[in-house]
C-alpha cells in the first residue's frame, strides 16, 4: 500500500511507503526497520562525537544568555534516553547505572557531581546501544502494539512502538545539538 499526499499550497507530492507494504514486499520485520533507522541516527551521532574529541567535553557554551548542554552532558543523556526509551519502556532490563538518572528527561544541563569520564560515557553509549538493538530486534509486532509497562507516552500514545519512534527522533534532535557544538568549537563537519 502506497500513500501519496498532495500538500497545499505548494502542490508538492510527498510519497510515504506504508510500513506494512514494506514488510510484505521485502520480508523485514517492523522491529528490524526501526532498528535500522535508529542505527543510521546513531552512526551520525558517533561521527559528530568523534569530531568533538578535540573539544572540551565539559564546557557549557553560552548563547544569548542561555547555557547549552555540554558534549559530556549530551552523551550521558543519550545513554539514559536509549536505556529508558528502547529498553526499560518496552519491558527490557536497563543498564542499572544510578548516576544516569541525573541526565534524564527534564535535566538541568549540569553535570553530575562526579563528572563522568568521556571514555566511560562512550563505552556506556556503545554498550547500551548494543543491548537496545538486540532488545529491539526481539520485539514482535504484537509487542510493539502493546502499551509500554512504564505508562509513559507522547501525544497520548503509550505503545511500545511510540517509545522507539520517539527514541529515534530524540537522538536525531540531539545529534543536531552536537553539530552546533562542532560549529561553536570551530570543528569542521562538512
Image (spheres, helix red, strand yellow):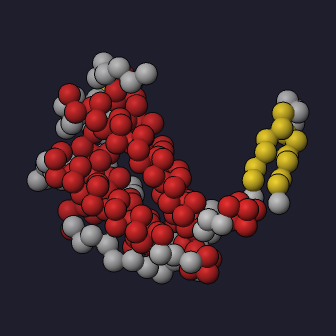
Q: Is residue 44 left or right of residue 94?
A: right
Q: Is residue 107 in view from this perspective?
A: no
Q: Image point 35% across, 37% down: which residue?
A: 47
Q: Is residue 54 left or right of residue 186?
A: left
Tally the numbered discs.
Answer: 0
What is the quadrant of the C terminus in the image?
top left
Q: Quadrant of the rendered structure where residue 6 is?
A: top right
- Residue 90 location, x and y as percent? 47, 75
Q: Is residue 45 in view from this perspective?
A: yes
Q: Image point 66% across, 66% down: which residue?
A: 27
Q: Image point 35% across, 20% down: which residue?
A: 188
Q: Is residue 143 left or right of residue 5?
A: left
The foreground one among 159 and 59 is 159
Q: Is residue 132 above or below residue 64?
A: below
Q: Image point 48% across, 43% down: which residue?
A: 173
- Residue 93 location, x and y as percent? 33, 77
Q: Quadrant of the rendered structure where residue 92 is?
A: bottom left
- Residue 122 location, x and y as percent? 23, 49
The foreground one among 185 and 139 is 139
Residue lying farthest to the left in this orientation: 114
What is the quadrant of the N terminus in the image?
bottom right
- Residue 79 location, x and y as percent? 31, 56
Q: Is residue 133 above or below residue 78?
A: below
The foreground one among 44 and 32 is 32
Amino acid at each position: 500500500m502506497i500513500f501519496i499526499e498532495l500538500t497545499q499550497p505548494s502542490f508538492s507530492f510527498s510519497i510515504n511507503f506504508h510500513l506494512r507494504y514494506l514488510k510484505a514486499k521485502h520480508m523485514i520485520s517492523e522491529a528490524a526497520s526501526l532498528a535500522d533507522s535508529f542505527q543510521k541516527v546513531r552512526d551520525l551521532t558517533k561521527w559528530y562525537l568523534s569530531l568533538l574529541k578535540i573539544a572540551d567535553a565539559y564546557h557549557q557554551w553560552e548563547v544569548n544568555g542561555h547555557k547549552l548542554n555540554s558534549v559530556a552532558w549530551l552523551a550521558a543523556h543519550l545513554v539514559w534516553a536509549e536505556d529508558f526509551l528502547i529498553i526499560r519502556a518496552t519491558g527490557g532490563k536497563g543498564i542499572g547505572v544510578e548516576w544516569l538518572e541525573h541526565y534524564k528527561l527534564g535535566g538541568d544541563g549540569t553535570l553530575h557531581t562526579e563528572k563522568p569520564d568521556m571514555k566511560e560515557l562512550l563505552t556506556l553509549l556503545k554498550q547500551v546501544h548494543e543491548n537496545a538493538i538486540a532488545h529491539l530486534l526481539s520485539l514482535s509486532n504484537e509487542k510493539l502494539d502493546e502499551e509500554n509497562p512504564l505508562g509513559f507516552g507522547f501525544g497520548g500514545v503509550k505503545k511500545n512502538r511510540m517509545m522507539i519512534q520517539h527514541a529515534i527522533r530524540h537522538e536525531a534532535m540531539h545529534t543536531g545539538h552536537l553539530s552546533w557544538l562542532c560549529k561553536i568549537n570551530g570543528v569542521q563537519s562538512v
